[in-house]
Image: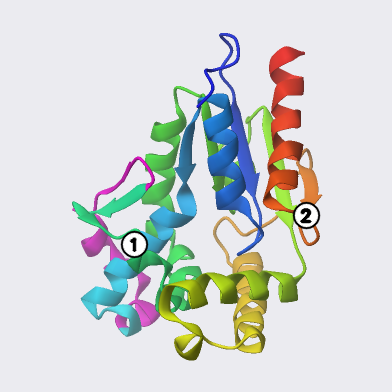
Amino acid sequence: METRIGKRLIIIAIDGPAASGKSTTARIVAGKLGYTYIDTGAMYRAVTLKVLRSGMLDELRRDAGLVAGLLGDTVVEFRGDRVYLDGEDVSEAIRENSVSREVSFVSSLKPVRDRLLELQQKMGAARGVVMDGRDIGTVVFPDAEIKIFLVADPHERAKRRHAELAGKVGSAATPTVEELEEEIRQRDRDDEQRTHAPLKRHPEAAVVDTSLLTIDEQVARVYDLAMNVLEG
């Protein structure tokens, strides 16, 4: 890992829809800069996993306020590249497709967003962070020095998601690319239309289309933007 560039610490906010390459790009850029990487999507996935395990999903569809009882003692933390929920390593569990299908709904609940917003702003208060999600540049840190909005073709995103799942559970147990594409399109609609902190691009955010880019190319574009600010 390289050391931090100079003494100035900034916030890099990377937003975008599911499977657009946010997490991988943010993680690598943070490593190159010696910054802290904060995967806010993993935080919402962890809360979604807790909701699914509680069996309260249907109740929350009728009364979102009930989620407050679950949030009261919930602790989400990062230890290196691992994600912990109430002390349990859930790094693999939160990537299961059952979580992917429900995370848009759970993350749309105002008590969930309010609680995680508080945690995310506290995590980034000292700056020197790369944070990715869907409302980082618009809600969590609208004053971030660098705002990026990643986009990609839904079919390409579905192919990436299929490869990821097949590598974990095998092709036979993985939904088809077409099924995953429909889930992704629905999730995009849910994220863009939710009442609280919908997915949208900040007017100052640089748009990067990752449909035809390799990870190295994505990282290079974001890293170059960071260096222009840090060395400017």
Packing grade of label 1 (10 A; few <14, some 14-19, many >=20) is many
Q: In x, y percent, where is residue 114?
A: 41, 50
Tell how many labels. 2
Disc 1 on helix, strand or loop?
Answer: helix
The residue pinned by badge 1 equals 47
Span colored in magenta? 59-81
Q: Residue at x 30, y 71 (%)?
A: 51
Residue kind at label 2, given as amino acid type: Leu
Cα gap from disc 2 to disc 1, whole angstroms: 31 Å
Q: Is residue 192 visible?
A: yes
Does 65 sit left or right of 216 as displayed? left
Residue kind at label 1, given as amino acid type: Val
Does 71 sit left or right of 175 as displayed? left
Q: In x, y percent, where is residue 196?
A: 54, 59
Residue 180 in which image quadrant? bottom right
Residue 204 in which image quadrant? top right
Foreground residue among 118 and 155: 155
Q: Residue at x 48, y 38 (%)?
A: 37
Disc 2 on helix, strand or loop?
Answer: loop
* Quarter of the picture holding the C terminus: top right
Does 122 sit left or right of 155 as displayed? left
Q: In x, y percent, where is residue 100?
A: 47, 73
Q: Nearer the viewer, mark 2 or mark 1?
A: 2
